[in-house]
Image (spheres, rainbow, N blue to C red):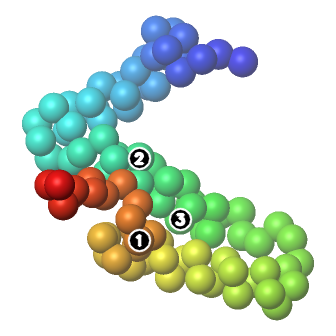
Amino acid sequence: MKTPRQKYVQDNHYRTLVDTLRSVVEQGRFTPSEIREAAILASIMYEEVHIGPRLLLSPEMKQKFDDLYKWIDTPAPHNVPPDHDRVKVGSGS
């Protein structure tokens, strides 16, 4: 299996995708985190439409997936768990 860097060097379509993503980050249009989020969301949306459910889920597991989809669709920062990636400011003492 090729590494992402090997694919970048050897596959023109992959290189174009990577260069496009780098470009929008460098232009300040999106942050690297937003690019990662968008790639994950695009993958989830593709699977929802084209692959569909592959397993019969228990009601409990279905509820967990429903909760996950609600979290995905909630605008940030509300979808960030408390204290996640936040800078803590000391009391100065």
91 left or right of 44 in image: left
Q: Which residue is drawn at 57% across and 61% down?
A: 44
The N terminus appears in which quarter of the rendering? top right
The C terminus appears in which quarter of the rendering? bottom left
Quote the CA–CA distance across marks 2 and 1.
21 Å
Return the x and y of residue 15 as percentages of the image width and height: 40, 21
Reply above or below: 38 against 2: below
Quote the CA–CA distance across marks 1 and 3.
26 Å
Q: Residue lying furthest bottom in this view?
A: 59
Quote the CA–CA distance across marks 2 and 3.
14 Å
- Amino acid type at circle 2 is Arg
Which of the labelled discs sits on residue 3, or is there none?
A: none
3 left or right of 13 in image: right
Label 3's element? helix
Residue linked to disc 2: 36
Dot 1: few (<14), some (14–19), or many (≥20) neighbours within 10 Å? Answer: few
Lower sequence index among marks 2 and 3: 2
Dot 3: few (<14), some (14–19), or many (≥20) neighbours within 10 Å? Answer: few
Residue linked to disc 3: 45
Q: Quadrant of residue 37?
A: bottom left
Which of the labelled discs sits on residue 82, or is there none?
A: 1
Lower sequence index among marks 2 and 1: 2
Label 1's element? loop
Q: Residue at x 80, y 87 (%)?
A: 60
Total labels: the figure holds 3
Nearest to viewer (mark 2 / mark 3):
2
